[in-house]
Each structure stands twice: as structure tokens, then as C-alpha cells.
Image: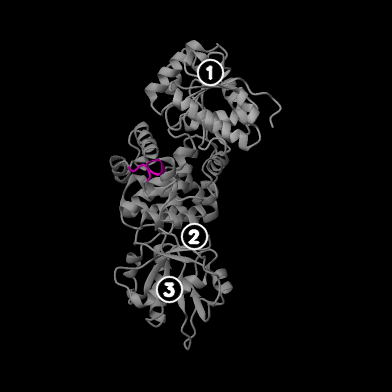
């Protein structure tokens, strides 16, 4: 528990975020004035807080919670945290009033997730005491707090909020005042690319979620997470960032979100979104879910694996499953399958053509296709019917893999490939042929967005990675992930996407190009 007492906190807005912040402060031993204009909202917040404290054996701390119906009752607070609806005009009006009501040395913080803190502070006569203090939902659980430095924020204000976050048991990160700050900005591709994949018919929403969870190690797939957050809230964040960045293509909202809004299918809170819910649980728990992880083993015979580094962990899995490994087939042997794990078109084309000519036509060829489409590769071989694509970059991760078939393929090979993948301990998701598949497309765009955030001085690389792990529970920070995959491979995937779509959305950040060349990007000055 903190040794330094918390200042008297005033919290405006007793909804989900406001009540969660209040609970966090009370649990840390602080005293809170929780203000909301709606008595029923205050009563609901008090019930929630009381039940949580009682569950933790801290029910006596409810005595330090003071409910307020009028804004002027918050005037004696030493720090005020605003958690009102995410509308700039509402927040500016509140801060204009708070600037007059509160003591001259009181700090005024906004919990906005995407709006400009500088614009909110500009509504006051003392903008130096205004900054952002962005908690993550659920506030009592998630450890991260973004302390946002507006253009006018004084160093003393920022330091005071950093110390307050620490006293509340949180991990603060200081970020510049750019749209979305760190977490909401860097996370945009997680949702945006999933929506585009869904809109292009590459995979269903449930398949996308399962691939992301089971192969990528994310705790929750993008569609499930949008349902949890609220599709309306997620869409509004996207629209806000798109508007604030004057139409940056990476933040463009998707028509599927707008269709869900029109339908009133907003996620768990309305009982349906991408999934249908009953009592907060997905009705059809088997939707897109493949249970019973296949056991590794049972493989017999030989598999061929080409030169290349685009399928880390594949050879080890094959050996663990019982297969003999080679790169060249003996004349009297028929391998179970041949894996092509090279990148770069010219190298992949050369090796694929060689294996196609060397092996009998009934032997399946499996080519990694994170930086090439399978239909493109089908033009390089004489027997395209036996050619299939797989996600090599993430094959060694998790328990799932994505497979792709060309337009004309031998359907008789599909059960054999399913059996092969099961022996390697992988669940199979057959998806449509699309540039960068599912997981490479989403993860490489996350790496790219993090690189842009670093380039633009929002925060340094270590802070960005820490924020994404603590704020949204990513298994790795995006720039850590880029290093693990190889920045050269991330760049190849992004250039492949750009070549296929010719959209600025997929332009690679200069920081990635520098890292791919082995250069260390120059330190960036933080935005003030």
C-alpha cells in the first residue's frame, strides 16, 4: 500500500470509468467525492463500489466515498479527474466551470481516451494545471495510466499526476497529446484490419478471433473485444482519430461498424454485436471455436523443408511429431509434404519451381505466404493443384495455423493436410487468399503504428511496448514483436500489402525501414 496519502480526489461522472477510478482510489486508501447529475447513476456506482470493497474485506472504506449531485460540491478537491461523455464541447464546458470553482492550486485532469487535452485545457484560464490522466477499463484491474502532457501542462502538474497514479497502485506512462495517445492509437490496426478482413470475406469474425487468440496469443480477438468495449465506443474512437488526423487512412472507420450502429447491435450491452449474448456470455460458445488442442505426434515418414527463415519453429515441430527432416528428396522416397519457407519473390519462385519439377505431382507443396499470395505463386509452378499456402511467420506460436488454397486445387489433398497439421499440434483454419493472411497483416500493422508513434515523438519504444502490454494485455509490445519477427520481414509484409492495395494505409514507417537496415533510429523529442 502507498505510504504517501492520496490527495482528496474529485471525480466527475459516475459511470463505468468514473466509478472504477473512484473504487481504485478508495482501495488505495484515498478519499473521494464522486459527482454526477443523475441520482440513479450515483446509486448504481455506490452499490458497485460497496460490493467490491466488501468482497475485498475493505467495506469500511465506503465511509470515504462522498456522493455529490452538484458540480460545486467538488470545489474542495485537490485533484479533479473528469470522466464525462467523450464529447469535446461537454468537457470544455466542465473545465471552464472547474477552473472557476476549484482552488487555485488544484490539478484538473481529464480521462479522455482520444480527444485533445490541449483543446480541453484551452477552455480554462489556468491551462498549466490541466493534463490527461487516462485509465483503462476496468480501472481497478488494468495497471496502466497514461499521463498526457498537453501543450500548456506544467512539469509540476505532470509529476503530480505520475505520483498520484503510483500512489493508486498503477503504472504511469507519460505521453504526448496526440490523437489516441499511445494505447488507443497503436491498437487501431487490431480492430481496423480485422474489419477489413471480415469485409473482404477472408474469414468469419469467429475465425479471425480464433486465429488471433490461438496463434497470436492475444487474450481476446478483435471482434470479441469490440463487443466487450461496445461497438459504438470503438467506432467513435476511430471516427475521432480519423477526424483529428485530417483523414489519415490508417484510422478510417469501416462500413461494418456503421452497419452495426444502424442495427443497434453494439455488443454485450445490447445482447448482440458480432456475437449474440445471454447473461453476458456468448450464446453459441462453439461458434468458430475448435476445442481439444491436437497433440503433437503420430507423424511418420519424411517432410522436406526448403532454405529460408519464414517459418521459425517448423522444423522442430516436425521432428517432435516424429517426421524425418530433409531439404532434398531421395529418388526412391515420397515425402509426406514439402514446406517452402523462403521470402522474397525471386528466391521463393526459384525454389518452388525446383521442388515442383523434382517431386511427384501428388506430393503437396506448402508455401509460406505472408509476403506473397498463393494465387500469385500458383503461376510459378507446373502443378498448381498441389500448392497450398500457410502462415509461416506464426507457425511456431500457439495452437493454430491458417491455410490457403489457390483457385484451382486438389480437394483430395485437404484431408491429408489437415492430418499433417494435427500431427504438428495445430488446429487448421482454411481462409481466403488475401495479402498477408490474417495474423501477419494485423501484427505487422501494429508494429508499423507503434513505429509511427515513436517517429512522431509520442513516446519512446520501451514506453510504447510497456503501455501496450499493460493497457491492453498484448503478449508482446509491438516493437518487441517486430524485433522477434525480424524488422526486415515486417517491412516485406507491409510492402506486399502496399503493392497489392496501393493504399497509403499500408505505407511503411521510415523507422521500420531504418530498423530493417540494422540502423538504430535517432532519439525523438517528446511532443509538448
Q: Secondary structure at mark 2?
A: loop
- Give the Cα distance between marks 2 and 3: 18 Å
Query: In which quadrant of the rendered image does the N terminus lie?
Result: top right
Sequence-wise, the earlier of marks 2 and 3 is 2
Which one is in front in this view, the residue at disc 2 or the one at disc 3? 3
Q: Is residue 159 magenta?
A: no
Q: In x, y percent, where is residue 518?
A: 53, 50
- Give the Cα distance between marks 1 and 3: 62 Å
* Residues marked 2 and 3 touching at CB (< 8 Å): no
**Residue denoted by label 2:** 394
Q: Is residue 18 visible?
A: no
153 is higher (above) or lower (below) than 212: above
- Give the Cα distance between marks 1 and 2: 47 Å
x 38%, y 79%: residue: 357
Question: For residue 88, which numbered disc appears in the image?
Answer: none
**Residue denoted by label 1:** 129
Q: Is residue 269 magenta?
A: yes
Q: Which residues are magenta?
A: 265-271
Sequence-wise, the earlier of marks 1 and 3 is 1
How would you rate the neighbour count of disc 2 (Cα within 10 Å): few for under 14, some for 14-19, many for 20 or more? many
Q: Secondary structure at mark 1?
A: helix
Left or right: 408 in relation to 65: left
Q: In x, y percent, where is residue 244?
A: 37, 31
x 44%, y 60%: residue: 289
Left or right: 380 in relation to 174: left
How would you rate the neighbour count of disc 1 (Cα within 10 Å): few for under 14, some for 14-19, many for 20 or more? many
Question: For residue 417, which numbered disc appears in the image?
Answer: 3
In the image as oriented, which residue stretches furthest toward the bottom?
A: 332
Q: In x, y percent, where is residue 513?
A: 46, 48
* Residues marked 1 and 2 touching at CB (< 8 Å): no
> In the figure, residue 120 lies in which quadrant?
top left
Amino acid at each position: 500500500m502507498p505510504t504517501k496519502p492520496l490527495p482528496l480526489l474529485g471525480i466527475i461522472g459516475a459511470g463505468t470509468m468514473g466509478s472504477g477510478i473512484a473504487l481504485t482510489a478508495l482501495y488505495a486508501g484515498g478519499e473521494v467525492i464522486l459527482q454526477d447529475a443523475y441520482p440513479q447513476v450515483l446509486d448504481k456506482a455506490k452499490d458497485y463500489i460497496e460490493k467490491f470493497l466488501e468482497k475485498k474485506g475493505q467495506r469500511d472504506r465506503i465511509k470515504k466515498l462522498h456522493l455529490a449531485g452538484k458540480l460545486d460540491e467538488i470545489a474542495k478537491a485537490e485533484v479533479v479527474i473528469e470522466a464525462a461523455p467523450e464529447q469535446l464541447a461537454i468537457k470544455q464546458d466542465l473545465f471552464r466551470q472547474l477552473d472557476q470553482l476549484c482552488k487555485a492550486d488544484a490539478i484538473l485532469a481529464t480521462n479522455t481516451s482520444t480527444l485533445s487535452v490541449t483543446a480541453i485545457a484551452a477552455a480554462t484560464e489556468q491551462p498549466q494545471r490541466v493534463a490527461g490522466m487516462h485509465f483503462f477499463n476496468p480501472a481497478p484491474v488494468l495497471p496502466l495510466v497514461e499521463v498526457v502532457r498537453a501543450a500548456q501542462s506544467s512539469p509540476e502538474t505532470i509529476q503530480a499526476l505520475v505520483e498520484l497514479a503510483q500512489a493508486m497502485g498503477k503504472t504511469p506512462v507519460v505521453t504526448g497529446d496526440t490523437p489516441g495517445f499511445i494505447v488507443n492509437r497503436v491498437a487501431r490496426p487490431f480492430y481496423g484490419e480485422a474489419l477489413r478482413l471480415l469485409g473482404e470475406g477472408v474469414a468469419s469474425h469467429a475465425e479471425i478471433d480464433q486465429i488471433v487468440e490461438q496463434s497470436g496469443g492475444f487474450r481476446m480477438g478483435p471482434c470479441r473485444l469490440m463487443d466487450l468495449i461496445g461497438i459504438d465506443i470503438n467506432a467513435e474512437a476511430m471516427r475521432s482519430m480519423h477526424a483529428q488526423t485530417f483523414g489519415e487512412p490508417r484510422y478510417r472507420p469501416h462500413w461494418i461498424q456503421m452497419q452495426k450502429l444502424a442495427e443497434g447491435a453494439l455488443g454485450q450491452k445490447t445482447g448482440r454485436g458480432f456475437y449474440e449474448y445471454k447473461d453476458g456470455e456468448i450464446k453459441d460458445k462453439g461458434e468458430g471455436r475448435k476445442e481439444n488442442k491436437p497433440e503433437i505426434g503420430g507423424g511418420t515418414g519424411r517432410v522436406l523443408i526448403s532454405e529460408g527463415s519464414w517459418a521459425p519453429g517448423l522444423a522442430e515441430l516436425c521432428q517432435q511429431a516424429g517426421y524425418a527432416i530433409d531439404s532434398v528428396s531421395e529418388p526412391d522416397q515420397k515425402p509426406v509434404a514439402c514446406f517452402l519457407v523462403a521470402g522474397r519473390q525471386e528466391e521463393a519462385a526459384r525454389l518452388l519451381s525446383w521442388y515442383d519439377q523434382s517431386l511427384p505431382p501428388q506430393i503437396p507443396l506448402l508455401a509460406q505466404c505472408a509476403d506473397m499470395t498463393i494465387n500469385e505463386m500458383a503461376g510459378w509452378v507446373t502443378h498448381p493443384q498441389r500448392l497450398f499456402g500457410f502462415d509461416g511467420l506464426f507457425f511456431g506460436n500457439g495452437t493454430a495455423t491458417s491455410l490457403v488454397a489457390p483457385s484451382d486445387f486438389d480437394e483430395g489433398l485437404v484431408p491429408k493436410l489437415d492430418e499433417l497439421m494435427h500431427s504438428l499440434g495445430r488446429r487448421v483454419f482454411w481462409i481466403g487468399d488475401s495479402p498477408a493472411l490474417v495474423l501477419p497483416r494485423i501484427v505487422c500493422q501494429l508494429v508499423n503504428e507503434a513505429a509511427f508513434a515513436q517517429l512522431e515523438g509520442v513516446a519512446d519504444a520501451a514506453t510504447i511496448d510497456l503501455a501496450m502490454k499493460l493497457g491492453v494485455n498484448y503478449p508482446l509490445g509491438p516493437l518487441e514483436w517486430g524485433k522477434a519477427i525480424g524488422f526486415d520481414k515486417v517491412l516485406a509484409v507491409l510492402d506486399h500489402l502496399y503493392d497489392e492495395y496501393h493504399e497509403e494505409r499500408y505505407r511503411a514507417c521510415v523507422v521500420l525501414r531504418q530498423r530493417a537496415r540494422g540502423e538504430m533510429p535517432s532519439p525523438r523529442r517528446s511532443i509538448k
